[in-house]
Amino acid sequence: MQHVFVYGTLRAEESNDIHEAARRSGISDPVLIGSGHINGRLYDFGAYPGVVPDAGASPVHGDVYRIEDTLVPVLDEIEEVVPGISGLFRGEHMHVTVELDGRAEKIECLVYPVSDAAVQGLPRIDHGDWVSYRRSR
């Protein structure tokens, strides 16, 4: 088991809903731990967002789930992460702030960020929430 932070299309009821991805693959349903955030800059790629981690930036909002290790290759496939090949997204482990019982805690999570070079010229989502941004377009 491990934790994953989802901030875009892997969020519940989005186009790559993490629950549906697990179900399609016959993997146990991810368990929502809570809302979380990392500091970074969120960008609009059109059909999906990408985050560039940046400790000096504002929070990028998402959800933290506990998942079976067997779900990671499914998520990697959705995010087109292939070991040894440089792509748009990469899987990294980082500390995510999550709200648990009214207090903020840091949990190590798998996150799928993009590089600074990948976001050149793209619109930034200043408030850091893909779901509310997508719904308002």
Image (tube, helix red, strand yellow):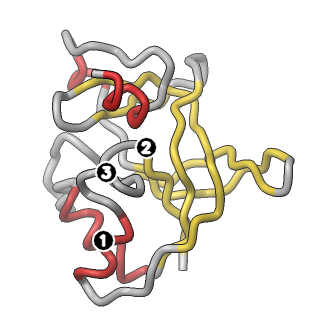
* x, y percent for residue 120: 21, 14
* x, y percent for residue 105: 78, 50
Residue at x 39%, y 33% (from the top left corner): 130
Q: Is residue 80 left or right of residue 35?
A: left
| Residue named by callout 2 | 7
Residue at x 36%, y 40% (from the top left corner): 113
Q: Is residue 91 left or right of residue 53?
A: left
- Kind of residue sitting beneath label 1: Glu
Q: CA distance from mark 1 to mark 3?
A: 10 Å
| Residue named by callout 3 | 14
- Which numbered disc, 1 or 3, marks the residue that appears first in the sequence? 3
Q: Quadrant of residue 64?
A: bottom right
| Residue named by callout 1 | 20
Q: Are marks 2 and 1 in contact (CB under 8 Å)?
A: no
Judging depth in this view, the residue of 75 and 14 nearest the camera is 14
Residue at x 30%, y 30% (from the top left corner): 115
**Element under label 1?**
helix
Residue at x 30%, y 36% (from the top left corner): 114
- Which quarter of the figure is the N terminus placed in? bottom right
Q: Outermost residue, right direction?
A: 102
* x, y percent for residue 61: 54, 36
Q: CA distance from mark 2 to mark 3?
A: 10 Å
- Kind of residue sitting beneath label 3: Glu
Check the image and report above or below for 114 versus 126.
below
Q: Outermost residue, bottom direction?
A: 26
**Element under label 3?**
loop
Q: Is residue 136 left or right of residue 62?
A: left
Q: Outermost residue, front direction?
A: 136
Judging depth in this view, the residue of 117 and 68 nearest the camera is 68
